Amino acid sequence: MRHFVKCALVGVLASAGASEVLAAAGGTIEEIVVTATYRETNLMETPQAISVADGELIESLGVTDMKQLVQYIPGLNMEEGGDGGGTGTTRYIIRGVESQQGTLSYEPSFSGVSVYMNDVPVTSAQGPARQVGGNLFDIQRVEVLKGPQGTLFGEGSVGGTIRFIYNEPDTSAFDFKVTASGSSIDEADDMSHRIDAVVNVPISDSVAVRVMGFDVQEAGWIDRTSQNRKDVNESSAKGMRIATLWNVNDDVTARLWWFHAESDTDGSILAQKPYEEYLLTTLPGTKAESFDDQDIFSLELDWDLGFATLYSRTAYFDRETVSRSETTALVAGVFDNFIGNIILSQNPELSANYVPPPADPLIPGTNLTHFQRDDTAATERWSQEFRLISNGTGKLSWTVGAFWKDSDDLRDNFQPIGYAKPQFEPLFAPYFSDPSNNRDDNLEELSGFGEVSYAFTDHWEAAFGARVSRLKQDFQRVENGTNDTFFTPSFKLSWRPTDWALYYFNFGTGFRPGNVNFGQEFNQRQYLAAGDNVIEPPGFNPSGLTGNEAAEYVNGIIYYDGDEVANYELGAKLMLLEDTLQLTAAAYYFDWKDIIQRFQDPVIPSTNKYYSQNAGDAYSRGFEVEMTYLIGDAWRFRFGGDINNAELSDDVPAPGVAKGNQLTFAPEWSITAGVDYSFDITASLRGNVLLTHQRIAKQYQDAANLIEIPEREVTNLRASILSADNHWRATLFADNLTNEDEVIRDNTYLGQPFFVFQKPRTLGLEVSYEM
């Protein structure tokens, strides 16, 4: 808290001290247009909390992906490395709201933050920690819509919505841009590089094509000392986007675009200490790696009907992520002990070639030598949206729409095992061939939505919206699916007393669907019910359960419902000091009902004791502020910060999960501050220096608040020389200037330390040219 107050005071004092200089300087802050309401509006005239990074800001900050941009957006948190790998393990948290668990294949939950690329929904259906990261080159802007967006954006928009909006083809002129960078990471022996390029080609007065491509190679910085291997976590990414625009006539515009990206990481980003790893082992003949392949096809049609414009968005999204994770010899020993005791007690005649494991489960086993995890997640999704949006500037404006989505989602978690002797494989294999780790599900969503806005006077305006959504889920492994209907209303009231001030009240709602748990208990009980010859583990006694549990468990199934949120928000947006000081602030309260939590079943004698279930309520309340202050053409100050209190409001019948516990990945405060200075070098050359700093409070990784991620900070510095006509730029940069090595995730398991550390200091040179 003291850091938040200190930085806020610095920003306020800087603003006050510079006010006299400002009056003579004459610079103003440019307007930013957003489409958060599906119609173009000025950011400062839109009555809801939206943080926007436009293309110019993204370029000046030098950010290329969301893990960098998130540093500059208050109220937005991001966690990476959730599955122990690097690629495809991104989780977004807005105002402390996101899934509290749900990353495992047999007890998943849907994400609480929705993600869109242009108008294509790419929100992860494979758990909250597998979100799309987004490439930020040739982008028009990134919009972060805070608070539930269930009315316009539907399922998954519980905490908010992130929208990546890319530049369109331009029929008016040929242009291109290329950016290349090379960098050196502390602790890495090799260099990293990145190349981004885009070209816009007008084919005729009505047709244009825009092609973007990128190639990234990043050196690793973690050494595997036990194997004398250096930089085991090197990564790469490449991709392209091809977009075609056709102005069919004065009323109809068509766009067709394709985006392809593939990224991979060798090794793991886990380490025992900065930046050294010495515990993990690899199954002979395999290597740890992860990759993420994505394809998006979209057809967009805009038809001006005079009184309104009809928008059609047809999209196909295909994504596959694979993670091959290493474990330690200790993990193999635990399974050797656990399963070995079952084998010996139930089937002594099968254990002639079996060596009893040590009594201590933490001593490595003698029968299982290696245990690994191969996790595949795949999504194939079609979506169609129609929107009819009123034209004109009268007192009444309206939007109506319909949305359909059909998503096939596969999750396959397989455990390759190493055996001391081939004879052991038939004894252990049935326990590692668990079909409950395989999911092949389908989600179909059909919804209708609308919003009506009416300006009562020149100063007061109100808007009411609602969405009705029907979601049907089918699960391959069980007979019964789910069929839910959600109603998500919204209301906005805004007051604009002057041209430079907007005050508003915003009420919004959001929802996530429920799901079904698969686990070892499902697998074992279904086999027993079918009369199959399966080794019955000690303590297995479904008849010992009572009440509703007995009915659910005898069938081997635990279903759970979705959860819902309502958000109440008061906000202000001000343009002060002759449009040189932009200030936004919002206070909010989330009311979260039937929150999905993780539980353990003590009856199950398995390592897969976990399942998801609804349990009680939670809330998130806080305050956030953003300020940009421009002093002439030379100085620009930016400040952003939030104070957030996100907690459980009920006790939960799970170990250590109690009323007052902080929600996962919900820091109590964060601050970001930056200053950049522009100056003339010669008549044709300009210079710019940009210094930014972010600090984020401690947070907890688990609902019981036992795993703490410490407070951390990062400082970045960029110094640029650029031509006065903006054709070229050369930049020296230092990311993580002070080389902080804080923990950003704790994956400690069975008492053995595994951490994800902040990326070390990176020094580099970036050059760009555009025409």
Image: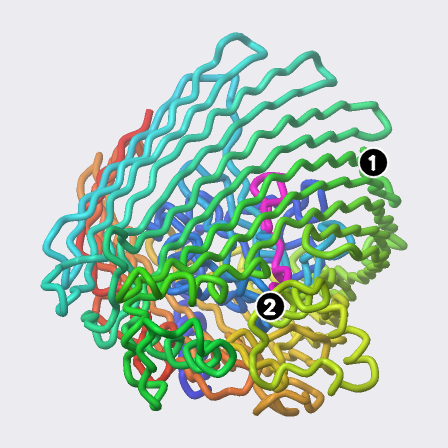
Nearer to me, 666 or 350: 350
Q: Counting residues from the N terminus, which is met first, the one under dot 2 or under dot 1?
A: 1
Q: Is residue 325 left or right of residue 541?
A: left
Q: Is residue 656 visible?
A: yes
Q: Is residue 581 visible?
A: no
Using the numbered discs, state the Cα–Cα distance from disc 2 to disc 1 in whole angstroms: 50 Å
Name the spot of residue 280 as percent of width and height, x first: 25, 68
Instruction: Give the amino acid type for the residue marked by disc 1 in the picture.
Output: Ser
Residue named by callout 2: 519
Residue named by callout 1: 390
Residue name at image x 40 percent, y 54 percent:
323
**How many tags in the picture?**
2
Number of residues whose C-alpha sits closer than 10 Å to that of mark 1, classed few (under 14), some (14–19) or many (20 or more)? many
Instruction: Give the amino acid type for the residue marked by disc 2 in the picture.
Output: Gly
- Considering the image in quadrants, where does the C terminus appear? top left
Residue name at image x 49 percent, y 76 percent:
347
Quick check: 388 above or below 159? above
Name the spot of residue 416 as percent of width and height, x first: 38, 58
Q: Is residue 524 left or right of residue 329?
A: right
Q: Is residue 466 magenta?
A: no
Quick check: 286 above or below 314? below
Name the spot of residue 365 as percent of width and height, x first: 30, 78
Question: Which region of the structure is painted magenta?
Answer: 107-123
